[in-house]
Structure formats: structure tokens, C-alpha cells
Amino acid sequence: MQYNMSQFYIGGRWTAPRGSASAEVINPATEQSLGRLALGSEADVDAAVAAAKAALPGFAATRREDRIALLERVLEVYTARADDFAKAISLEMGAPITMSREMQAQVGIDHLEAIIADLKALDFEETLLNGDTLVRMPAGVCGLITPWNWPINQIVLKVGPALAAGCTMVLKPSELTPLSATLYAEVLHEADVPAGVFNLVQGEGPVVGAALSRHPDVALMSFTGSTRGGVAVTRDAAETVKKVALELGGKSPNLVFADCDLETAISEGVEACFINTGQSCDAATRMLVERSVYDRAVELAQAKCAQMTFVNPAEPGDHMGPLSSAQQYARVQEMIEAGIAEGARLVAGGPGKPKGFETGYYARPTIFADVTNDMRVAQEEIFGPVLVMIPFSSEEEAIAIANETPYGLSAYVQTGDSARAGRVARALQSGMVNVNGAFLSAGSPFGGVKMSGIGREGGREGILEFLETKVISAP
């Protein structure tokens, strides 16, 4: 399949960039080039925003039924091309093809189905108890910035709700994963999204992202990525007082109590850290284990880690893939070295690449035991296959350790006591809590507190992020 990496989608058609900047797109499994990507400029952003602004009055005035029908067409076209997305994501960020099909590409279907259901149920007007009328209206032209780790997941969680709300938009995906974004522009075009409603400009955050965030005609910025990037978007958006929605980093705790099914909890806990090669903002990267079963838990985690295998991502099966880039590989290696230097006990993995995978950005799945919560590996988001294990003696101590982090995205609780599960879940400072192997379903709001973000993505709450409130008071 050929991917259009030399043009942007603006005003309903593919257009040449206004500048000449470009960058190599690298397959992280082979370190070979997939081609050169045109990088956008401020002039490209101006053109895309102008197209979105021109399309806004007409699209904002569409009926809910028309937008439902539009989203259903998008879903139909995307579903027919789902395997194209799986292959593209596997190429551009190294996701093993089975995982790419069953998870990376599949969420593009699951989330859109949930968005359509929530749009059908959402009240755009309601009468308040005082008799006034509350009206929900499109926020306007939206700037959307998405990351590389779950590329279609994040694109759908922004584009879908924006379309549902009646907004127009400009998307800037990660320059590491441009292939899936290009395919999504093709899907929207085939589904007859009106010209100018959706626009795509590829490029770098400090250039395209900053130009979007500062643009006076952009009313809302929706950003998913690092906390550092979210701070930059917020700062750039402040001058024009934009609405800002952020889904940022995490250092999610997994609280394992002695009364749980320990073998299952540890096996699933290691997987919850290592899935997508640890490149998930909600990965369960801090495993807190009750002291009475801690030694056994470390043994089980070590054994589970030894079962992790590497195979060419193009081959089907349940195996791990590479990290997304040379930069990400270097970051993971730095943090593994930091854990060793700080005195954490290395029980699996370590620095370097797995045997036989010297080519590609592969990192050894790594587990540190006897970690204290003040260590860098316990506090900083690593975004790789690195798990830290910390013992605790009481429920209160477990909660205190879990909450002692600048992040608050997700958390996990493993216990055989349902009362404890509810009690601990409510005490954890996080936007989401997964209990005993359960995971958030499509249609539930995804997002966090503290430095993990502002606002929510997904379902009804995700649509509301793209709406503003007007109150009409009349005699």
C-alpha cells in the first residue's frame, strides 16, 4: 500500500505543503526508512484553520440526525479498511500485527460505536429547575494533537466527538505515526465529511502544534501526549483564552493485596505493564504488593517476565514489539540505568537489547524489586517495558504510596474483599480505577487528575468537551 506522506488534507482535498521541510519515517522494527514525511509550517496551519473556519457555520447548524448518519458512514468505511490500519500501525510504531489488529485498529471501531450511541442519547437542550433553557453548542474550530503510542485510538477519541458536537477541526498527529492519520483522512473523505470540516496537517509539535495552539481562530485545543507537551499547549493557548483539554502522562499504581488470587494478579499485572511494549499512559507500572506475599509475588513476576518473547512484528502471535523510536529506546535505557544506580534490585531484564534483536529499537522487559517510592523509576514516566515492585504493610500505607505521585491517570486494585475494593478505589487519586482484571470499556470517560490532565475523552463526557453552554432566559 502507498501512503501519501507528501501532502496535507485541507478543505476537502490533498494539497502540497507551503514549505519544504521533511523528515524520515522509520520502521522501528527494522530501522529502515518508510519514506519522507512533509512537515507543515505556520502557513499550512493558517490554510487549514481558514478552511475549518469557513466550514463551521454550515456544519454547526446540522441536525443531530445528520451527524449520526455521517458518523455511521465513517464507521462503515473504517470497518471495511480496519486491516489497512492494523498494517500501517504495525509498520510505523512496531505493534505486533495480532495486537495491532485486535487492539490498535479495533478501538477505532469500538470507540466510534460508543460515540454514536452517546450522541443519540445526548440532550442538546434542557430546561433547568429555574425555568431557563440550557443549550449546548459547538465549541468552534478545534485543534487536535495526537500521540504515536495508540495513534488511531486517540484520533478517533478526538475526531469522533468533535464531529458529533458539530465542530470543525485541524488534526496534527505525531510525526512518528503519520501513516494511520493519512488513512483516517482517506476514510473521512470517502464517508463524505463536508469539505473543511476535517483538515490534516502533519508536522512537529513546536511548529505545527504551537501554531495551532496560538491561532486566534482556534477555539479549543485537545491534546494527548506528555505532560511537558501539555504544558506547552496550555501556555500557547493562554493568550487567546482557549478551552484546553489534556490527556497526559501517568505512573499508575497496581495495588496487590494478599487476599487476591496472587498468581492471576501478578500475571495480569505484568501484562498490564508490558502491553504495547509499555508504551501506554495508563500502564500499570508501579506494582505495590502486600508484604506477606511480596517475595512470592516477585518470584511470579520474574517467571512471567521470562515468558515474554520477541518475534518480527509482521508475524502473528502474542509477542512483544520494539519501542517506537531511537529516542524512546534511549530514554528507557537511561531509566533502567537510573534504577540500578539508585539501588533497586534488578530481578529481570536490564540494559541492552534482547538476544537476536540487535537491529530495531527492542528493549529487554525489565523488573525492579525493593523499589522505594522516592526513586526516579517510581516517580517518572518511563514509557517502556519497565515494572517497579514496592512492598506495603497495610491498606493505609498502600493508598499513601499509590497517591504519592504527581500523576493521577489510572490505578489498579487486586483483592478478594469487595468492600476493600470499593473503599480503596474511592481513596485513590486517579481518574480511573480497574479492579481485579477489569478494564475501562469504550464509552467510559478516559482521563486523569493532577498532572495527568484536564477533561475526559470517550463517550458522553468526550462529546461534552467539544461543546459550550449557553443559557437562555425568557419570560
Image: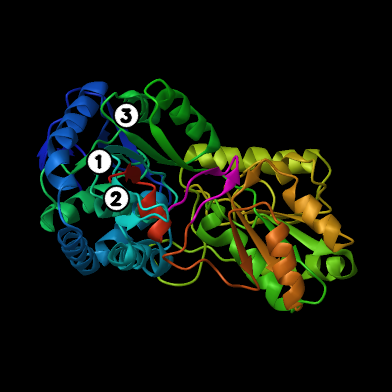
* Residue 438 location (% of width, % of height): 58, 72
Instruction: Please tell me whether residue 107 is drawn above or below residue 225 in the rendered image.
Output: below
Q: Is residue 270 left or right of residue 461?
A: right
**Discs 2, 1 touching: Cβ within 8 Å:** yes
**CA gap, disc 3 to disc 2?**
16 Å
**CA gap, disc 2 to disc 1?**
8 Å
Callout 1 crowding tier (Cα within 10 Å): few <14, some 14–19, many ≥20 = many
User: The residue tagged with tag 1: helix, strand or loop?
Assistant: strand
* Residue 398 location (% of width, % of height): 81, 58
In the picture, residue 207 is in which quadrant?
A: top left
Q: Which residue is mark 3?
A: 212
Closer to the chain start, of discs 3 and 1, is: 1
Which residue is more in the foreground, 421 or 170? 421
**Residue visible at 82% across and 73% down in the picture:** 258
**Residue visible at 49% across and 56% down in the picture:** 446
User: The residue tagged with tag 2: helix, strand or loop?
Assistant: helix
Q: Which residue is mark 2?
A: 159
**Discs 3, 1 touching: Cβ within 8 Å:** no
Callout 2 crowding tier (Cα within 10 Å): few <14, some 14–19, many ≥20 = many
Residue range of the region highlighted in magenta in the rendering: 446-458
Q: How many numbered marks does the figure carry?
A: 3
Q: Is residue 49 left or right of residue 301?
A: left
Q: Is residue 139 visible?
A: yes
Q: Which residue is mark 1?
A: 169
Give the amino acid at mark 3. Leu
* Residue 339 location (% of width, % of height): 75, 43
Q: Which quadrant is the N terminus positioned in?
A: bottom left
Instruction: Please tell me whether residue 81 is drawn above or below residue 171 in the rendered image.
Output: below
Instruction: Please tell me whether residue 41 is drawn above or below residue 263 in the rendered image.
Output: above
